[in-house]
Amino acid sequence: MPQGIGVFDENLCLRIWNPGLVDILELPPDIVREGAHFSELIRVLAERGEFGFGDVDAIVERQTALATKFEPYTYEHAGPRGRAHLFRSEPLHIDGQLAGCVTTCTDITERRTSAEREQLAQKVYTHTPAGIIFTDEAHRILSINPATTQMTGYESFELLGQTVFGLIELEHEQSLEVFQENIAQHGSWNGELQVTRKNGDNFPAGTRVNRVDDPQSGLPANYIWILADITERKQSEERMRHIAQHDTLTGLPNRLALLMRLAQLLPEARRHNWKVAIMFLDLDRFKIINDTLGHQVGDEMLREVACRLSSVVRETDFVARLGGDEFVIILPGINSPSDAATVAGKVIVSLSSAIEANGHELHTSPSIGISLFPDDGPDGDIILKNADTAMYHAKAAGRNNYQFFASEMNLATSERLNIEHKLRHAIARNELALCFQPQFRAGDAMPTGVEALLRWHHPSEGMISPSRFIPVAEETGIIVEIGDWVLTNACREMKHWIDAGLKPMRIAVNVSARQLRRRDFCETVASALAASGLPADLLELEITESSVMENPQEAIIILERLGRMGVTLAIDDFGTGYSSLAYLKLFPIDHLKIDRSFVADIETDLNDRAIAFGTIALAHSLGLRVIAEGVETEDQLDLLRSNGCDEVQGFLFSKPLTSAAAFAYLHARCAAG
Ligand code: C2E
Ligand code: MG
Ligand code: MG
């Protein structure tokens, strides 16, 4: 027998036993002998600490007293080396007389641990937050744990016998058969599924399926489905994704999101032969608003612009902010470039009404560059870069307009870079020079002054026209340094001429918007005057109307300071930009220069004539004098003169001349007059 058996007589002396008794209890063989007393055996166990630690005599006495009662008992006992023993004792009667007891001892270690394991498993099964579904070989539900009920809303009885597939939904492309086959084949499956609740809702579940094989046949017998509700993880992933892909200021998608959208959209467009338009949009004058009114106003304005852009485009279009005042709109699936032009037109209209920001009424306009996929580039990077290039051309074309990309633009861009590179050395290498074009009184053609015009003699490229390099110099800021050079040299030149005997006369110097924005511009002018010794009232600064209109309030302050210094001011290229008469009245201006484009057509074009004559009348009503530039013919001169134009400048009288030639020319004319 696997148990140990000992028979004790009525005096608790051992009478019969089997080898199992010695083995299971691990008793020393000399103790187990005929007539050994119960207490002797117990003492061995007590000394091993199997009844707990304490006084061994007392333990032996207590256990012996218990046995002496000869009552049936069962007792689970921790044996040596972590084994579990079950003692049973039954009184033994012979002919109705108590004759002793039979004691058995069974090793129940295996049984106990497997029961414990089962209990533990049961605990896990009931208390784990994971849903556990136990199915048969056809995925029919055999049992579910409480967490499954909690997740799905189904009670156990509602699901028993149903297949798991009534509860879950697979990814779009996956078929049930393939999925089942997969699990059966690989023994387990990991992934995400949608689980449908009793109330019809869905939630994403991280899922693991394990196959359990029948140990006899080796065939799949059961499956264990373990589900975890990952809604929260998905939500926080989604939140992170949103944060990473959106601009916090406007809530629009950011550059990363834009690139991802393009990466997804362009291959699709290529497959279907669709065109995609990319519009790159930059706000005109935003930097000035931001710098002068503060970032809060700038931010407010960007939010409003974002709002307006989102409302003009369609649902399927995509508006992103790249940062600063740069926005990009993607128009997928357009039919022709004119569709993009229509949207660009709408964008311009939507931004044309004033924007209210922190109590300021602001005006902005967009410069928009448009490129088309696949016509203007094979991938997102190039398409975007080309839209950016086109945007620069829109800016150069006078802002508030849109331009389609054309491959020549990249040539223009590289030319610009080329010029910029060379221009940086022009002053140091002495490549710049001034020439001078005389100006005359219209009535008697007496010289009144000269305009200083910049020339760049590049050693290998020859003469580079100011209309080519001045815009680059303005864009890059090199104009500030060049402008200082022009001012200093122009003043010095006129002072030389006067010192050499020329009748003192005015010298006009062109000033760009970029120079005018500098805080220290008045000081620059003052020091050019001081260094040359030229009287301030002989210096005239030519400023274009657009440069003062960029920020009229600030311009007034600077121009007034210059006026107080005695310097005179002329508005150059009048009529080509956009002026507010209300402001014009506020500037301390002395001259208006009618742009040469009006003068050129004054004989033939009635509109130009009306503008030229209107300008003269307007200027006179404001107390200003008028100079017409670009006068090339006698007829032009006659028309201007008879309509009251005060002064003239142009090839009819003289081209721009070198310093020496200008001095000789003026000296002779003044002497002759
Ligand atoms: P602007 O100030 O309007 O200068 C007048 C331009 O008209 C000059 O061209 C001059 O040569 C040209 N011009 C004069 N008379 C006639 C004429 O009868 N017919 C025609 N067709 N043209 C005439 P330029 O020298 O090529 O200068 C072009 C522009 O470059 C200037 O226009 C001015 O805006 C800018 N610029 C020139 N020098 C400077 C400078 O030192 N600083 C700045 N900021 N700009 C300058
Ligand atoms: Mg000028
Ligand atoms: Mg001009």
Image (spheres, grey):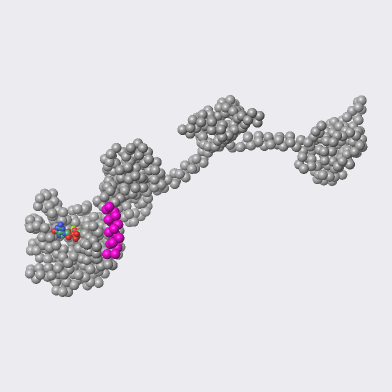
Quadrant (top left, top right, bottom left, bottom right) of the N terminus: top right
Task: Check the image and report above or below for 413 versus 163.
Answer: below
Residue 291 image position (x, y, % from top left): 34, 56
- Tell which of 519 and 531 is nearer to you: 531
Task: Check the image and report above or below for 488 versus 598.
Answer: below
Q: Toward which corner of the image does residue 421 lie, by quadrant?
A: bottom left
Q: Toward which corner of the image does residue 189 lie, by quadrant?
A: top right
- Tell which of 383 and 654 is nearer to you: 383
Residue 267 image position (x, y, % from top left): 37, 40
Task: Check the image and report above or below for 419 versus 362.
Answer: below
Instruction: State yes or no: residue 423 in magenta.
Output: yes
Residue 84 relative to residue 514: left or right: right
The answer, for residue 560, to whether it is visible in the render is: no
**Quarter of the rendered structure image containing ligand 3:** bottom left
Task: Check the image and report above or below for 584 versus 565.
Answer: above
Residue 110 image position (x, y, % from top left): 74, 36
- Tell which of 495 and 175 is nearer to you: 175
Residue ID at (58%, 36%): 130
Instruction: State yes or no: residue 128 in magenta.
Output: no
Quadrant (top left, top right, bottom left, bottom right) of the C terminus: bottom left
Residue ID at (11%, 49%): 606
For the stretch drawn in magenta, the main secondary structure is helix
Residue 486 image position (x, y, % from top left): 23, 65
Q: Toward which corner of the image does residue 487 lie, by quadrant?
A: bottom left
Residue range highlighted in magenta: 411-426
Residue ID at (53%, 29%): 165
Residue ID at (7%, 58%): 634
* Figure disc tally: 0
The answer, for residue 126, to whether it is visible in the render is: yes
